[in-house]
Image (cartoon, coloured by chain):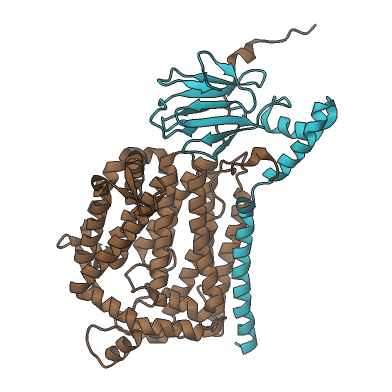
Chain colours: A cyan, B brown
Amino acid sequence: MSELTLTVMRLGFLAVLWLFVIVAVQVIRSDLFGVRVTQRGARREAARPAERAGRQAAAPQQQGRQAAAGGRRGRNTPTKLVVTEGTLTGTTVALQGQTITLGRAHDSTIVLDDDYASSRHARIYPDRDGQWIVEDLGSTNGTFMNRNRLTTPVPIPLGASIRIGKTVIELRK
Amino acid sequence: MSSSTHQTSTIGAVGAPSRRNTELALLVFAVVIPVFAYINVGLAIDGSIPAGLATYGLSLGAMAALGHLAVRKLAPYADPLLLPLATLLNGLGLVAIWRLDQSERLQARPNFVEAAPNQLLYSGLGIVLFAVVMFLLKDHRVLQRYTYISMLVALVLLLLPLVPGLGVNLFGAKIWIRVAGFTIQPAEFAKIVIAVFFAGYLMVKRDALALASRRFLGLYLPRGRDLGPILVVWAVSILILVFETDLGTSLLFFGMFVIMLYVATERTSWIVFGLLMSAAGAVTVATFESHVQQRVQAWLDPMREWELSRQGVVGHTEQSQEALWAFGSGGTLGSGWGQGHSDLIGFAANSDFILATFAEEIGLTGVMAILLLYVLIVQRGIRTALAARDPFGKLLAVGLSGAFALQVFVVAGGVMGLIPLTGMTLPFVAAGGSAVIANWALIGVLLRISDTARRPAPAPAPNPDAEMTQVVRP
């Protein structure tokens, strides 16, 4: 084999190997810089004043996407559940029309590692109109929304804090 | 970023796509690269395309296909990178082992056996085990039930090599057992099992370990009785070091426990304690254990060891120095596949010292890429831990990827002369059946956790009220 061919192959191999590494890093780029979350946020931010002005056609794009993603959804419905206090702080769960259970039981959607939480503590589910409801499942220490203990299933306003033991969650757009 | 609603980082998978097609594309890439290297070795050594190309390429392709189909079917939302990364490393390892098989110097050695066919077989078995793990383990949280059983199993696996008649002493370390003609390294499997125990145990006990402490000199000092678990693990790893004379296994288990303890409690003091304890243990054992002393000697002054070994003095090794020469002669771009002389290392060239072959033939540039592949595997593991929604899954993923990282560090550091050489193998790359099979199982468990973490919650059951209420239209 000629020297030239081998040199080309040697350099070619290194190039291909590094290309793989770079492609792999590209694949996880979304982890490093976030998954277009900021863009979406910015667009919604832009849409907000328009909504206040009461114009129906303010954000048709956004509405279309939401409808495609989660079925029946109004404009003011939350899209994610965010844990704001407790050991799971920062965790988000997308709200896609599914029931979310919270508790210490390890088949819960959000497993709370908290001695003050019951194993099946509360659940959050959408009613027929797409309004999200929180219901206490007979927990020992209770579920609180804005410092009021829940006795019946209650709709969750955007940004209201729901406290379960040491964990606080919020619904956000 | 400017929006105040996005202060918290998005850890959960908000409508994550499954990304299986990305994985497939990367897998094709990960099969093509080793095949390219394989052809390159053949052209460099014989001047012709090697005869085994079809077998090798098809086997690797079949392995990748099996792995991909298993993930597609059993863990559709799992991480897209882990499988291609592991496949690429495994493929490159096979090429390096096969390349060393072609060496006339090694063939001239007594009891030379071709290692590549066996390694290919074990890699295949590894992929099968990978699929089986994902098939049997529908949800990683069931492992939590077996916390203490895992501890027992891990201890038994670790102690097996000490059982007379079963354990064999090969090359100065008693970490192998011989069953029906096969030598198995049970510690490789124990690694996964003990991670399950540590995760289950720490999840329950972490509050006691984190909260009950006094602050002293900026460190949280734990209460005396809370030191119990770390002391027990430390004692076990010292026992491994003394009776099995294996620094690597010992370091791996203790290090993994310290990593998981730190992650579970968020207390830096555990790392300080861990480092102090492992240093104290290693120094104490090194004062009376000749095998360990020999390794330390070879680390401090490899050149002298090389000369003494050349003069025929028993108990010295020339390999550490030879590995360093391999690194040196590789330089920045390497000599090219099949054109190096790392086969001069002789014994263990294709297992403990395989990184030297890479260093010589693909140079610093290539070794950096290989190390980055490991970094990416570890990063995906830690990322999986972040995304997991249950504490057990978080700890298990951290433990497994921590063990993986530690193992790469211990082997690469040993071969490069940063730390004394230990008897561990480079995951996926080095020749060794148990290691490659166990590491595929490890990747299987990580993929399962990742799938559970990224999977969108199941669709809601249809609401019976909504079904009944029909709107009557005229």
Residue A79 x/y as whole percent: 65, 32
Q: Can residue B290 be seen in this view?
A: yes
Which residue sits at x=23%, y=72%? B286
Residue A119 in which image quadrant: top left
For this rendering, which residue is in front, B259 or A105? B259
Query: How many labels were placed on the picture?
Result: 0
Which residue sits at x=25%, y=78%? B294
Q: Quadrant of the C terminus of chain B?
A: top right
Q: Is residue B443 left or right of residue B208?
A: right
For this rendering, which residue is in front, B443 or A44? A44
Q: Is residue B286 left or right of residue A83?
A: left
Outermost residue, front side: B217
Residue A131 x/y as whole percent: 65, 21
Q: In this view, does B157 lie above or below B394?
A: below
Which residue sits at x=43%, y=59%? B124
Residue B328 x/y as whole percent: 48, 84
Residue B348 in which image quadrant: bottom left
